[in-house]
Image (cartoon, rainbow, N blue to C red):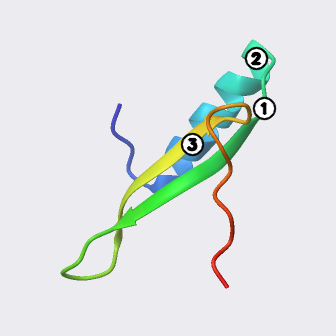
Amino acid sequence: MKFDTLQQGINVYENYAKVSDFDTRLYSTKKSKSDGKISLKYCVCNKEGFRETPRL
């Protein structure tokens, strides 16, 4: 699916998760090297993979 805004896509996935009885979390972000805009955002089930450790 393609959405007009990132927030619309996140909202759709969170609503689907609520109906399907699971929790979500934002996992990873990729930004364009040319302009620094977000080009990809992963929203996953809260049990998916490992949570990235914060970089200090």
Residue at 78%, 32% in the rendered image:
23
Q: Is 42 situated above or below 31? A: above
Would residue 48 appear left or right of 9 to someone viewing this image? right
Assess disc 3: are there few (<14), some (14-19) or many (≥20) residues with their C-alpha within 10 Å of its C-alpha.
some
Q: Name the residue under label 1.
A: 23
Label 1 element class: loop
Say which amino acid is labelled 1: Asp
Q: Name the residue under label 2.
A: 19
Mark 2 vs mark 3: which is more N-terminal? 2
Mark 1 vs mark 3: which is more N-terminal? 1
The quadrant the N terminus occupies is top left
Q: Name the residue under label 3.
A: 43
Residue at 47%, 55% in the rendered image:
6
Assess disc 1: are there few (<14), some (14-19) or many (≥20) residues with their C-alpha within 10 Å of its C-alpha.
some
Assess disc 2: are there few (<14), some (14-19) or many (≥20) residues with their C-alpha within 10 Å of its C-alpha.
few
Give the number of callouts.
Answer: 3
Image position, residue 5 (x, y; %): 44, 55
Would residue 38 appear left or right of 46 to someone viewing this image? left
Say which amino acid is labelled 2: Val
Task: Tell me the quarter of the picture where residue 49 sits.
Answer: top right
Residue at 52%, 55% in the rendered image:
28
| Whole-number angstrom distance, CA of label 2 to CA of label 3 | 16 Å
The quadrant the C terminus occupies is bottom right
Furthest residue in direction left, as rendered: 34
Q: Is 1 situated above or below 33? A: above
* Label 1–label 3 contact, CB within 8 A: no
Label 2 element class: helix
Would residue 32 appear left or right of 13 to someone viewing this image? left
Would residue 8 appear left or right of 3 to someone viewing this image? right
Towards the viewer: 8 or 56: 56
Residue at 23%, 77% in the rendered image:
33
